[in-house]
Amino acid sequence: MLNKLSMSAAVVLVTCLVFGCAELQSMGGTDALIKLVTSQLGVTENQAMGGVGSELTLAKEKLPSVDFNALAKAVPGSDSYMKAAKDLGAVTGLVGDKAGLQAAFQRLGMESGMVDKFSGLLSDFAGKMGGESVKNALAAVLR
């Protein structure tokens, strides 16, 4: 019994090391970022995904590609979040700036003041996953 548990733990660890935590999510793991946003801000899962996706879309528009690629690595599922923002009707073209973010959030049924709350959580998350330079790059775009 103990050997089976040890083997299972080893498989999970190797999977995380080889494929990254995003692979674990697709294997039924919890999406830590969306869970964090919904619990901290009291929004729905769709609002969380659309809000994160809207902010990532603005970051993709504004950051040099090397910086955005580092951010996308730090935030597993970035492409899925940006697609969700479009599919949910939050992002309908270029986001452009903070006013564009506020409009996207309003299309998701949130107040424009939620932009700053999302920005803080997303920047902190990105910093924990990708380091201070990723956090600072994202924070600069979201100001």
Image (spheres, rainbow, N blue to C red):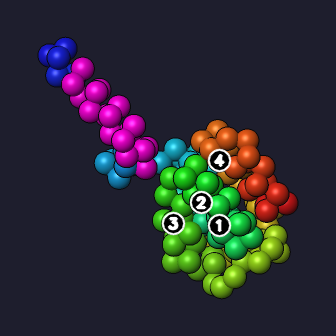
Highlighted magenta segment, given as a residue range: 6-22
Circles 2 and 1: CB distance less than 8 Å? yes
Q: Neighbour class for label 1 at 10 Å: few (<14), some, many (≥20)?
A: few
Question: 11 above or below 106?
Answer: above
Q: Tell me which label, 1 or 3, sits earlier in the chain.
A: 1
Q: Tell me which label, 1 or 4, sits earlier in the chain.
A: 1
Find disc 1 in the rendering and name its residue: 65
Which quarter of the picture shows residue 109? bottom right
Q: Amino acid at mark 2?
A: Asn
Q: Residue at x 35, y 31 (%)?
A: 13
Question: x%, y% of residue 142?
Answer: 79, 61
Residue 51 visible in this rendered orientation of the protein: no
> Closer to us: mark 1 or mark 4?
1
Find disc 3 in the rendering and name its residue: 79
Q: Residue at x 79, y 67 (%)?
A: 112
Q: Amino acid at mark 4?
A: Ala
On the picture, is 29 further left or further right than 80? left
Q: Amino acid at mark 1?
A: Ser
Q: CA distance from mark 1 to mark 3?
A: 14 Å
Q: Which circle marks residue 69 in the picture? A: 2
Residue 132 visible in this rendered orientation of the protein: yes
Q: Tell me which label, 3 or 4, sits earlier in the chain.
A: 3
Circles 1 and 4: CB distance less than 8 Å? no
Find disc 4 in the rendering and name its residue: 126
